Amino acid sequence: MHVVPAAIARCCIITTLAVGMLLMVRAQANPPPSHQDPAAMEAMDSTDRPSAMAAHDAMSGPLGADPHMVLTPPRPASQADSARAAALVRTMRAALASYRDVHLAEAEGFRQFLPGVKQPAYHFTKWRWAVGEMFRFDPARPTSLLYRQDPDGKFVLVGAMYSAPARASFDELDRRVPLGVARWHEHVNWCVPPRGQGGAARWRETHDGTPVFGPKSPIATAEACRAVGGRFLPRIFGWMVHVMAFEGDDPAVIWGAGHDHSHP
């Protein structure tokens, strides 16, 4: 698998925790009953600071060893895949280049997730486009723009994040972004604190130095979650993929943000 530079490899997630991504979850048409748990939406509300911060730290570690992460299976790359991927990057560069100016992005409705929190890469999400991703794929209208921050504080556009419904098949994901060049991922099997008074404080609980709740917890089954008095969420968000179209022409960098690597 390709490996991207550390600053890019640690860019995944987290805008999906905010209100717009809640709308995306609600917009999914007739998901299976097991995927309609309102607790999942409640737990991911970005107004719940412990939930948001836990998810911000969700991706520290190799994806292959993470019980809270699912990757699409790799497919052999074909010439058609490569041509389609190159066309997608050209479209992104033409359509999104004006957003190198982060102030323009903000003026057009993109909102930064977790402002004030230091991150290897920052997600700026446009909620209307995020909802639209549940029903169509348009490389010119991503869920989020991705920026890194220079030492002088300037935001530099590096790519975009696309999302898809949890119900999407591998073939549907492939039609959006070819699985021969990128791997989509989704977040699964979270144990979160119970509802009600004191639930937020329980995010800080540890056992032998390891978090009891959230994406850093070893708990990844409903039975183990019940044993600690938590709520089990079998799936969080839908599918996500990052495309670093503004980080040069090396395919390993452009498409590596969905392969096996360390996340933030």
Image (cartoon, grey):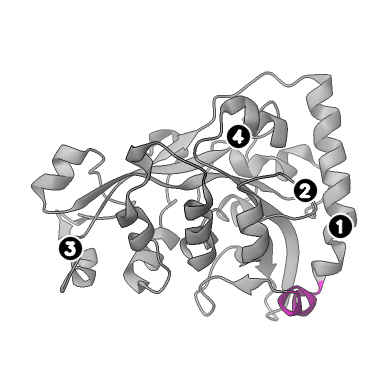
Name the one closer to the observer, 66 or 184. 184
User: Is 156 located above or below residue 193 in the figure?
Assistant: below
What kind of element bears circle 2?
A: loop
Foreground: disc 3 or disc 2: 2
Q: Nearer the viewer, mark 1 or mark 4?
A: 1
Residue name at image x 21 percent, y 52 percent? 231
Q: What residue is shown at x 49% (from left), y 75% (from top)?
A: 117
Dot placed on the residue nearer the N-terminal end, 2 or 4: 2
The percent position of residue 80, horizontal first and vertical second, equals: 83, 22
24 relative position to 228: left or right: right
Task: Kindly check if marks 2 and 4 are in contact, taking CB atoms under 8 A apart as contact.
Answer: no
Local packing at callout 3 (Cα closer than 10 Å; few below 14, some 14-19, many 20+) is few
Which residue is under mark 3? 205
Q: Can residue 55 be seen in this view?
A: yes
Q: Residue shown at 55%/53% (left/top)? A: 12
Q: Which of 128/30 is in front?
A: 30
Q: How far apart are marks 3 and 2 (CA)?
A: 41 Å
Q: Mark 1 points at which residue?
A: 95
Q: Which of 249 and 214 is in front in this view?
A: 214
Residue highlighted by disc 4:
183
Q: Name the amino acid, label 1.
A: Ala
Could one spot residue 67 in this view of the protein? Answer: no
x then y, percent, for residue 99? 80, 68
**Amino acid type, label 4:** Arg
Amino acid at dot 3: Glu
**Image location of residue 177, percent across then percent down:** 70, 36
| 128 with respect to 28 (left or right) | right
Judging by the rendered image, the residue that carries numbered circle 2 is 139
